[in-house]
Image: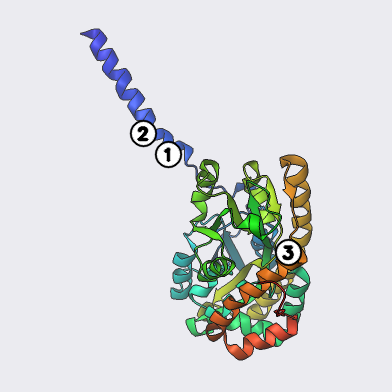
Amino acid sequence: MRFSKLLLVVVVAIAAVALLAPVAMAKKPSLEKWKPAFDYSKAKYKIKISNVSHPAIKGVYAGFAIRDALWKATNGQIYFEYLPFSMLGGEVEVLNQLQMGAIQGMAVSSVASTNLGPRMGLVNLPFLVNSYEKLDKFVANKKLFQHFLDGMEHQGIMGLDVTAYGRYGWATTTPVKNIADAKKVKFRIAEAAVNKMLYKAWGFNPVVMPWPDVPTALKQGVITGLDHTLIVCYLTRKFEVAKNFTPVNYAQGLFIWIFNKAWFKSLPADLQKTFKRVVNEQCALYRNECKAQEAAAKKGAMEKSGVKFWELSQQDHQTLVNQGNVVHMQFAKEIGPDYLGQVQKYLGYKVTKGMGK
């Protein structure tokens, strides 16, 4: 009898551990490493700002830099509470919170931004704003860039600037040296209309999949390639399985720093001016660090993960440009045909007839 009772206690204890283990393992991300070095408890204005990604990416870390610089510039009047790691929810959910005024801002990915600002899909179009030089040129044109940033004005949301997380390419389990190789790969792509249309135009084999499902799918062979940036693939250890990278550079990953306009207008005029200046200064600083971070990621991928890099031929590259032009035509109406045409001309976007198929 005593043995039976003891056995029952042991079984119950094991069951309790089994139930609690997943909770213990599913630790929430901590901001301890990036906590502010000042007491913000008496700040006159406290605001919440969201981002879905990891501060190891320079374009994401920019939020902490804005927080600290803003605290100093306003003499402790504004506390910019920055919450990355999807702490406030997914991007669509957070966009709704921002529109309603439940939070004051977010660094939204260029892919998700089209949910409230279709015009912002401009930067997702293939081979348009697809190099660091083109991004700098686009940002420098105040008229064209501001029209882009104003893409959510009708939703009560204002855009102030952008940071980056690298240029898109293909991380694959087998080498992709040409288009024929690419057509054999099962690419994971984002849940976005531009990406779906682009891969259809290219005649590839995409698998639309949420990002959290990628690690398991990659290990199990459900997908054999990723459509993402070198920086993200390196920092999230996707190169442990995908040992090849083809830098297609058809687009740049951008975070657009957007804020609730009603909240911003509620600030005194001097603080509005200071807020905009600080955001612009820090975004410019960390946007410029993206290129160096990409170079460091490439070196780390080769030396630490044994990744091999492959380059497409000029003809294959132009074929992708030509085939991808259907995306420009399809989204011209949402972006604005005249505006799109101005940006295309300004950045030298060209489709070459007769070269590529």
- Which residue type carries mark 2? Leu
Relative to 20, does residue 255 appear above or below in the rendering? Answer: below
**Residue placed under numbered mark 3 in the picture:** 286
Q: Are marks 1 and 2 in contact (CB under 8 Å)?
A: yes
Relative to 153, does residue 207 appear above or below in the rendering? Answer: above
Q: Are marks 1 and 3 in contact (CB under 8 Å)?
A: no
Find residue 19 and name its label: 2
**Residue placed under numbered mark 1 in the picture:** 23
Label 2's element? helix
Which percent across, then down, holds residue 144?
68, 85
Q: How many marks?
A: 3
Name which of mark 3 and mark 2 comes first in the sequence. Answer: 2
Quadrant including the N terminus: top left
Which percent across, then down, holds residue 138?
72, 79
Report whether residue 116 is seen. Answer: yes
Q: CA distance from mark 1 to mark 2?
A: 8 Å
Report whether residue 37 is seen. Answer: no
Quadrant including the C terminus: bottom right
Which percent across, then down, holds residue 43?
58, 65
Q: CA distance from mark 3 to mark 2?
A: 43 Å
Mark 1, other Cα within 10 Å: few <14 / some 14–19 / many ≥20 = few
- Which residue type carries mark 1? Val
- Which residue type carries mark 3? Tyr
Residue found farthest to the bottom: 338
Left of 53 or right of it: where is 22?
left
In this orientation, which residue lies closer to the viewer: 284 or 211? 211
